[in-house]
């Protein structure tokens, strides 16, 4: 038996609870975003008796929030998923505001005796585990000496980039064979396809694109199949990226982070996406402080960033986090990429949203953000706003020019009302 095999057997635990015994009281647990979350280990936490005054930091969890006494384990989210959203409103977890790029530095500042619990691929012949669908913020903590506990999942793809952990860095691990969470289907409506077409027209051949998950991003990618020499550098790899690569539109030739490769910090999609990523040396997962660094992004000459908003006011301020005064998500990387695109020499930052909600009864272009809303992206960082009614170019525009452009892409039934309110606010001259 080799030294590597001996160490592997010594660190392999029989049960999830055996792995958790390495967590000390009042230490902080950090888990990766989304798919990288080690579900078996997390679900075992309530039955682990060694918790007292601990905290669990998670982000965009795809699973129900565990039930546990808060004096034993306080749960803190950094971006609300659907299950976390409900738990936040019920007071079962708290929310930590952040820019995604800042999360590694923020965690290093506030976590106590950090323990990283992550899901990984099986170990390779050299003794390395891959974080598979993830690199995100945990790699920074691991590099700084955090205690590492793994759920080694036979179904996690082995990927490349800067997301490998050597056996010598691992305190203990538990083997599992669990299906990875997959993204729900997101069929495109007619309005999504219109927005997708408008956005695709703003993307030139040779662009470097940041895009994410959802019906509108899917519609945009469907309209990019005839583009050429595109590069994907994004924060999350969605399912439609595979189709875009197979169409020949994406070559990744302009990627400054890993030339010839697609780069991101995590992935969330279907089994097809995970299979595509497995052992694919043209896909690199990088830590979020690299993928989302606005300074580095600003050096990408032809950077196109595509993000969503819940509402946009007549100055161009974007709220992507709060609905009806209640938290829905968080900031994520929207500002990171928006600032990068603003500073890039030929960059374009695109904000997408439907012009109305609830069967056309609520305008998403508003005179002022709703009560309790937050500004996710500053008016000074917004370049283009796109709805199914057209494109509003805001960068370099005056208040009256912005107002006029945004009213023009609002739902037609709200335009006169918006115009009258803009006049009352002094954004437009009185008729």
Image: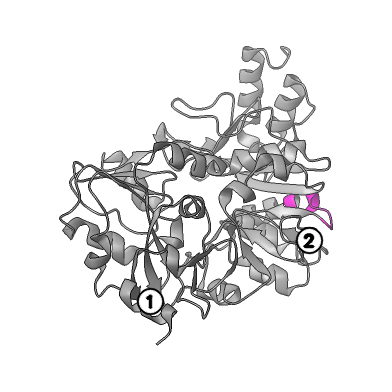
Disc 1 packing (10 Å; few <14; some 14–19; many ≥20): some
Q: How many marks?
A: 2
Residue at 51%, 50% in the rendered image: 140
Residue at 67%, 71% in the rendered image: 243
Question: Image quadrant of residue 109?
Answer: top left
Q: Secondary structure at mark 1?
A: helix
Q: How was this image coloured?
A: one colour
- Is residue 393 found inside the magenta-colored segment of the image? no
Residue toward you, 417 or 56: 56
Please give the residue where the numbered disc 1 appears in the rendered image: 8
Q: Is residue 360 visible?
A: no
Residue at 45%, 58% in the rendered image: 34
Which labelled disc corresponds to residue 230? 2
Direction from residue 264 to residue 200 in the image, left or right? right
Query: Mark 2 or mark 1, which is nearer the start of the sequence?
Result: 1
Q: CA distance from mark 1 to mark 2?
A: 42 Å
Q: Which residues are magenta?
A: 199-206
Q: Position of residue 188 (x, y in %)?
A: 59, 60
Residue at 67%, 12% in the rendered image: 426
Residue found at the very far bottom of the displayed protein: 1
Q: Quadrant of the C terminus?
A: top right
Direction from residue 297 to residue 21 in the image, left or right? left
Q: Position of residue 373 (x, y in %)?
A: 48, 29
Q: Position of residue 226 (x, y in %)?
A: 81, 66
Disc 2 packing (10 Å; few <14; some 14–19; many ≥20): many
């Amino acid at each position: 038996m080799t030294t590597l095999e001996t160490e592997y057997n010594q660190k392999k635990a029989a049960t999830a609870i055996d792995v958790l015994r390495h967590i000390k009281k009042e230490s902080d647990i950090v888990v990766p975003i989304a798919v990288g979350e080690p579900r078996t280990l997390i679900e075992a936490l309530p039955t682990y008796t060694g918790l007292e005054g601990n905290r669990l930091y998670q982000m965009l969890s795809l699973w129900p929030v565990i039930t546990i006494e808060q004096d034993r384990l306080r749960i803190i989210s950094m971006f609300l998923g659907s299950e976390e959203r409900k738990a936040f409103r019920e007071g079962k977890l708290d929310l930590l505001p952040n820019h995604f790029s800042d999360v590694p530095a923020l965690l290093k500042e506030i976590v106590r005796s950090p323990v990283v619990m992550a899901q990984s691929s099986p170990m390779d012949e050299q003794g390395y585990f891959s974080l598979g669908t993830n690199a995100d913020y945990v790699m920074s903590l691991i590099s700084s000496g955090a205690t590492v506990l793994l759920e080694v999942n036979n179904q996690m793809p082995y990927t490349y980039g800067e997301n490998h952990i050597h056996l010598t860095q691992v305190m203990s691990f538990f083997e599992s064979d669990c299906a990875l969470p997959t993204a729900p289907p997101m069929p495109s409506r007619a309005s999504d396809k219109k927005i997708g077409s408008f956005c695709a027209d703003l993307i030139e051949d040779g662009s470097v694109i940041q895009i994410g998950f959802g019906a509108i991003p899917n519609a945009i990618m469907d309209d990019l199949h005839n583009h050429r020499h595109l590069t994907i550098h994004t924060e999350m790899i969605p399912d439609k990226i595979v189709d875009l690569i197979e169409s020949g539109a994406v070559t990744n030739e302009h990627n400054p982070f890993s030339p010839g490769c697609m780069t991101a910090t995590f992935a969330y999609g279907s089994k097809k996406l995970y299979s595509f990523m497995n052992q694919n040396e043209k896909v690199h997962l990088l830590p979020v402080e690299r993928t989302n660094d606005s300074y580095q992004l600003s050096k990408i000459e032809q950077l196109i960033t595509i993000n969503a908003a819940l509402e946009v006011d007549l100055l161009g301020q974007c709220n992507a986090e709060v609905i009806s005064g209640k938290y829905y998500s968080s900031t994520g990387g929207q500002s990171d990429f928006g600032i990068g695109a603003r500073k890039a020499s030929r960059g374009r930052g695109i904000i997408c949203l439907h012009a109305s909600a609830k069967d056309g009864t609520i305008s998403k272009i508003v005179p002022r953000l709703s009560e309790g809303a937050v500004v996710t992206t500053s008016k000074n960082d917004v370049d283009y706003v796109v709805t199914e009614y057209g494109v509003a170019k805001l960068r370099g525009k005056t208040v009256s020019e912005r107002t006029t452009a945004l009213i023009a892409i609002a739902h037609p039934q709200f335009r006169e009302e918006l115009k009258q309110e803009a006049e009352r606010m002094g954004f437009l001259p009185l008729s």
